[in-house]
Image (cartoon, rainbow, N blue to C red):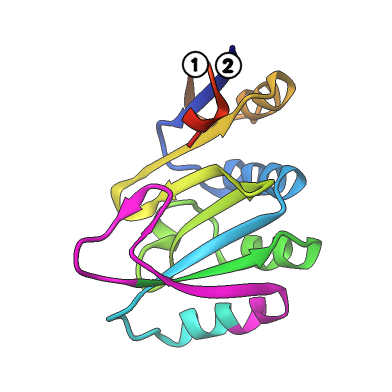
């Protein structure tokens, strides 16, 4: 039996709470994504962020779904990046919050650990959660001072039920 935890972030992480969460995500994860909707024209800020992150880009894919989102009859460009120390500093420099800074034109800053979603963020809905099966990781998350979150768990017979 496998146990997994969902940590539901119940209030937008901002300022120091955001920075601590981003530091933890970069410590634990190997990739992160940003999303640009197909019909969106990037403003100068969005273009600047993508340019700053360009050296860390793994690939960009045209997709209609990603963790936390399924589009109907639309597509978006999902940018996959390496979670490098330099990218960490860029992400902390260009934003001070998890939701309000990542809505249109760049959206849904999310993190992946070993190819699996870890921090799933749907910024325009003010929804984010963390998926983990590691107790020490859960403790680190829940001990971020000021982070408003609640922990739920479930037991599964196979890992195929893992997001």
Compared to 58, does 15 lie above or below? above
| Residue bearing mark 1 | 153
Q: Start and end of the magenta stretch?
A: 51-75
In the rendered image, residue 67 lying in the magenta stretch gets the answer yes
Q: Nearer the viewer, mark 2 or mark 1?
A: 2
Instruction: Residue 82 in the image: state x and y as whole percent.
Output: 71, 64
- Element under disc 2: strand
Q: Residue furthest left?
A: 73
Q: What residue is rendered at 72% in x and 53% in y?
A: 30
Instruction: Residue 135 in the image: state x and y as whole percent.
Output: 69, 19
| Residue bearing mark 2 | 3
Q: Residues within 10 Å of mark 1 (few under 14, many from 20)?
A: few
- Element under disc 1: strand
Q: What residue is rendered at 71% in x and 73% in y?
A: 56
The foreground one among 55 and 115 is: 115
Q: Tell me, yes or no, whether the two marked residues, 2 and 1, touch with CB atoms within 8 Å.
A: yes
Instruction: Residue 157 in the image: state x and y as whole percent.
Output: 53, 16
Relative to residue 77, is residue 125 drawn left or right? left
| Total tally of numbered discs in the picture | 2
Q: CA distance from mark 2 to mark 1?
A: 7 Å
Figure quadrant of residue 145: top right
Instruction: Residue 149 in the image: state x and y as whole percent.
Output: 48, 26
Relative to residue 35, is residue 19 drawn left or right? right
The N terminus lies in quadrant: top right
């Amino acid at each position: 039996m496998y146990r997994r935890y969902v940590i539901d972030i119940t209030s937008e992480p901002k300022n120091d709470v955001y920075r601590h969460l981003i530091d933890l995500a970069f410590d634990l994860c190997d990739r992160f994504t940003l999303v640009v909707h197909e019909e969106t024209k990037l403003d100068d800020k969005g273009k600047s962020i993508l340019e700053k992150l360009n050296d860390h880009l793994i690939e960009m894919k045209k997709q209609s779904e990603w963790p936390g989102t399924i589009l109907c009859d639309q597509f978006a460009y999902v940018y996959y990046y390496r979670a490098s120390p330099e990218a960490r500093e860029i992400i902390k420099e260009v934003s001070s919050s998890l939701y309000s800074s990542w809505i249109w034109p760049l959206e849904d800053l999310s993190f992946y650990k070993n190819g699996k979603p870890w921090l799933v963020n749907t910024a325009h809905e003010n929804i984010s959660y963390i998926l983990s099966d590691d107790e020490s990781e859960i403790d680190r998350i829940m001990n971020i001072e000021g982070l408003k979150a609640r922990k739920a768990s479930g037991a599964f017979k196979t890992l195929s039920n893992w997001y």
